[in-house]
Amino acid sequence: MKIELFNKIQTCNKLSVPDFDIKNGVKLIHSLLAKDSLRGDLVEISTFNPDAAFAPCITFVSGVGNSYPFASHSFTINKQKKFFDGISMNVYNFYKSRGYGELMRLASIIHMKENGVVKNNIEALSKAIPFHYKYGFRPDFANIEAIKNTSFADTSGADSPFNFIRGTLLYLTQNKGLSRNSVEQAYLLLDKLFVNKSLPKEDLARLDSLMIEYIEKHLDNWDKDLMIDDIPMSLSISKVQENAPFYNKLFEKHSIDYGV
């Protein structure tokens, strides 16, 4: 009986619409069936919202009726600021290359839309930057204080915006495939940072552009040119809507009846 049901579902053009729960004012996926990318196998997406205040929610990808997760994504949703803050995303070793990371990213977009979120913020590990870039995330140093929860005024902590931006600019000045003009721009921003102990929004936006140039020049050999970890990146709901055909095609690929 299970095989018969599985085969019927596999042949559907639209597999499933999300089933939601609302808890603590946050609307989350209770259950969503989808196909993986490897063989079109059926998996279930579900999200756990703990009772503890400020504890992160966790989206799981697992086999249908199987509580053992193949992948997980922890995050928080700030309804007041309308921010989705990604904490960590993991696909367990045996289950890589099956599209589970893509499914978790699609689940996060569903959560953004259903909760009126305006921006999804992350601090990206270097090895994961190409993955996040593929799904629309871009460097967002202009938003670094909001992402890192500290101000430029704090120059003592290694992870403060001041020290983090200094380290990033020093990295870019090492001529990592950037144009000569871009390297000069990195030096100029570094000088301004040391003089003013901060950078205005327009200079942070320039740093975002330098980072995009670096990423695009190294996507084909990323393992040889890893950036530093915890790069602030974000994806706005306006960018999701602007690129709706891209995301909607992914929903259709996994037989998820949802659109942005």
Image (spheres, helix red, strand yellow):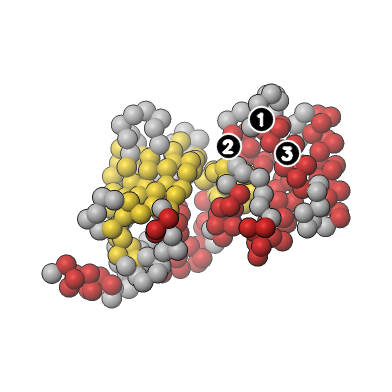
Closer mark to the observer between disc 1 and disc 2: 1
Query: Label 3 is placed on what type of residue?
Result: Gly
Query: Label 1 is placed on what type of residue?
Result: Ala
- Which residue does the numbered mark 1 point to in the structure image? 158
Residue in front for this viewpoint, 62 or 96:
96
- Which residue does the numbered mark 2 point to in the structure image? 147
- Which residue does the numbered mark 3 point to in the structure image? 167
Tell me which residue sits at (69%, 60%) in the image: 218
Dot 3 or dot 2, earlier in sequence: 2
**Where does the C terminus fall, quadrant-wise?**
bottom left
Q: Position of residue 241 (x, y in %)?
A: 51, 57
Q: With respect to residue 167, does 260 lie above or below?
A: below
Few, some or many residues within 10 Å of mark 2 (<14, 14–19, 20+):
many
Q: Position of residue 228 (x, y in %)?
A: 66, 45
Taking the image as shown, residue 145 lies to the left or right of residue 259, namely: right
Query: Label 2 is placed on what type of residue?
Result: Ile
Could one spot residue 259 in this view of the protein?
no
The residue tagged with tag 3: helix, strand or loop? helix
Closer mark to the observer between disc 3 and disc 2: 3
Q: Position of residue 146 (x, y in %)?
A: 59, 34
Question: Residue 225: which numbered mark, if any?
Answer: none
